[in-house]
Amino acid sequence: MKVIKEKHPLIMRWTHWVNFPVLTIMIWSGMLIYWANDEYSVTLFGHTLIKFFPDWYYDLLHIPSRLAEGMAFHFLFMWFFTLNGIFYTLYTIISGQWRQLLPNRHSFKEAWLVVLHDLHIRKMAPPQDKYNAAQRIAYTSIFVMGTGSVITGLAIYKPVQFYYLTWLCGGYHLARIWHFALTIGYVLFFVIHIVQVILAGWNNFRSVISGFEVIEEQPIPVKETPNKDEKA
């Protein structure tokens, strides 16, 4: 028997869907800023192995070199990103949703089982509550990454006014590296998250939009009580 069950509260769905386009714009505008001084690369013994990013990448995506435009978009949507994150955090604390999101002492072991199950190496499904172990770790990591992005962003934006944040990040240059590394982390999370959504199926995706999911429940068998004639 199919039943409809509530899964995601409205506020959590709202902050989730607001965060997606805002973060996309932040990454795009950050790319405009970075292209003005694209100095990062992986170099070994004087040979550049990876350059972030090569010229063909910018040409392929037609990314213009407009520093002022990138900074304007980045600093404007920074407020939406920060306020949305604060609102989400306060709601999870007040509502108690954080209990279902934070990893526990079994999460890292169970997360590995989730990976094996998704790769069809392990047939038995891992323990699944509202969020499985891998989701708990991923969503908590995004919270930590978001906090890190705000801190490193402020350290870069106002290194004199927020000198204590710049010092906490290890200096202005290291703060830029942390900020850039976090951006790459968001992109990787997007890719993995989308793949996981596809693997989870339409019912899971629908629940993130509507807040409800359709589940299959087995009817509880009713035990028949013999009547008086049968007892006799």
Image (cartoon, rainbow, N blue to C red):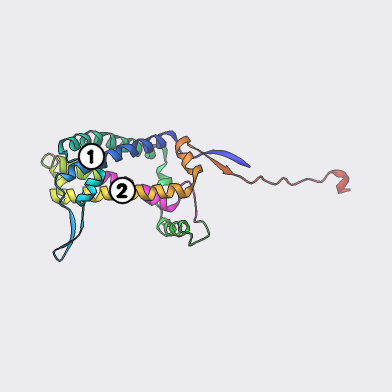
According to the image, label 1 marks what residue?
29
Q: Please determine whether, in this image, residue 47 is positioned above or below residue 101.
A: below
Left or right of 34 on screen, residue 231: right
Quadrant of the rendered image containing residue 209: top left
- Residue 41 is situated, as x and y percent measured from the top left of the image, at 18, 56
In the depicted structure, whether residue 74 falls above or below residue 174: above
Q: Quadrant of residue 2?
A: top right
The location of residue 188, given as percent across then percent down, is 32, 51
Instruction: Give the residue at x 54% y 39%.
Output: 5
Mark 1 falls on what kind of element?
helix
- Range of the magenta residues? 126-148
Quarter of the rendering occupied by the N terminus:
top right
Q: Amino acid at mark 2?
A: Val
- Residue 140 appears in the picture as rendered: no
Mark 2 or mark 1: name the one nearer the start of the chain: 1
Q: Nearer the viewer, residue 188 or 208?
A: 188
Q: Is residue 138 above or below residue 72?
A: below
Count all numbered tags in the image, as a single digit: 2
The residue tagged 2 is: 187
Predominant SS of the magenta segment: helix
